[in-house]
Amino acid sequence: MAEETKVKRKRIAATGMMKKIMADYFYEMDKAVKAGAPKVAWCTSVGPAELLRAMGFLVHFPENHGAMLGATRTANDYIPLANAIGYSPDICSYLTSDVGAYLKGETPLSKAYPGIENVPKPDVLVFNTNQCRDVQDWFGWYSREFKVPIMGINTHRGVREVTKSHIDSVARQIASLVPGLEEISGNKFDLERLQETVDLSLECSQLWRQVLETAANIPSPFTFFDGTIHMGPAVVLRGTKTAVDYYKALLAELNDRVDKGVAAVEGERYRLYWEGMPIWGRLRDLSEFFAHLKASVLASTYCNSWIFDAFDPKEPFGSMAKAYTLLFIVRSDEEKEKYIEDMVTKFKLDGIVFHDSKTCPNNTNSRYGMPERLRESLDVNTVTIFGDLNDLRCYSEEQSKTNIEAFIEQLERK
């Protein structure tokens, strides 16, 4: 590998506001658990958070906690504990690291937010299998551990065209959750409140899209690595005015960067797409390595997964079902390839980085010839990095960086 030059990352001023928002979010849940009210629901990251919020629950997202375990590089301390109770090293390392951390009685929340000792205990667990089946098993384990109810939505997979029958099926499942949630929360379902929540989620989603699309400018003011940090409020606080206010502030800052020609990567020469899960424990390292090569990884499937254009407050159940079924991970390979083709054009990209994530086959799209097909149809270079979202034993830094350097050399020769 060539010797790396030190790269200074450009700080985003809104980061301070985001840290305050995230701290308030976790402290509010901790306070609720200690006081016994309001009730806390655990929800998968693309589950029916709007319904839960509208019914008065505070909402915890275990996938967010899993990402924290990865980003703090503590996941490998916990994965073996879940393996020891029967959860394979080959399944989702969010699941195994999160369950392992619980078994060990530790959480990165304690270090980040003094006074918080544990993840918030749930009153109910609600999943949507649009991400994968692992979330159902993950929540099932906690349901047995905490002896609390589990509810869920089973989503169609490999969908080419999202039809009315798909939407009706999922919408009925979301609506069927209401009676049970009324009983647990003690609150009656209020359609108007759900519509308001969906409206706020739509506004959050639209602002998040605008934030991500500032990267279409040359040079890009924002990278995929920035996005993995600043997507926090879109994941855990969609459906709230807090998230909307945050993305208005972030968007204003990025638009100012665009007006002034400020590049996230100084001397940007190559514009790249990241396909697949982040490697949470190596985000900073990879961010600086790509920047050292004058390559801006500026768009991704992962960050785009919290853009939900289909939300419609006039039809909350149907539009939630549609939004959560249009999700990239739910779709057929043909639809995924069309999506990436559009991204390459919109963001004026030179190449695509595929991450083959060992324990996340559902969010890995490099195993059945997609890079080769896109290389031929789009005339763009691709590279595949082998690693994992949380389990760093699956990632070779030297091999990955050698492959990335060879990829950039190919772009130079093109």
Image (spheres, helix red, strand yellow):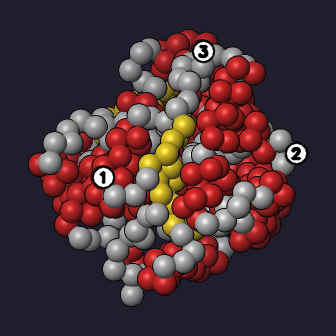
CB under 8 Å between discs 2 and 3:
no
Residue at 49% x, 45% y is: 151
Residue at 40% x, 41% y is: 136
Q: Position of residue 148 (x, y in %)?
A: 40, 58
Q: From the image, which quarter does the N terminus lie in?
A: top left
CB under 8 Å between discs 1 and 3:
no
In the rendered view, would you say 134 is above or below 243?
above
Q: Nearer the viewer, residue 347 or 93?
A: 93
Q: Is residue 330 visible?
A: yes
**Residue hosting label 3:** 334
Say left or right for 42 vs 159: left
Say left or right for 254 vs 273: right
Q: Amino acid at mark 2?
A: Lys
Q: Amino acid at mark 3?
A: Glu
| Mark closer to the chain start, 2 or 3 | 2
Q: Position of residue 145 (x, y in %)?
A: 28, 57
Residue at 77% x, 58% y is: 190
Q: Position of residue 55 (x, y in %)?
A: 67, 61
**Residue hosting label 1:** 144
Q: Amino acid at mark 1?
A: Arg
Which of the 4 image quarters holds residue 301? top right
**Residue hosting label 2:** 314
In the rendered view, would you say 403 is above or below 95?
above
Which of the 4 image quarters holds residue 184? bottom right
SS label for mark 3: helix
| Mark closer to the chain start, 2 or 1 | 1
Q: Nearer the viewer, residue 257 or 188?
A: 188
**Marks 1 and 3, how far apart in space?**
39 Å
**Marks 2 and 1, how far apart in space?**
37 Å
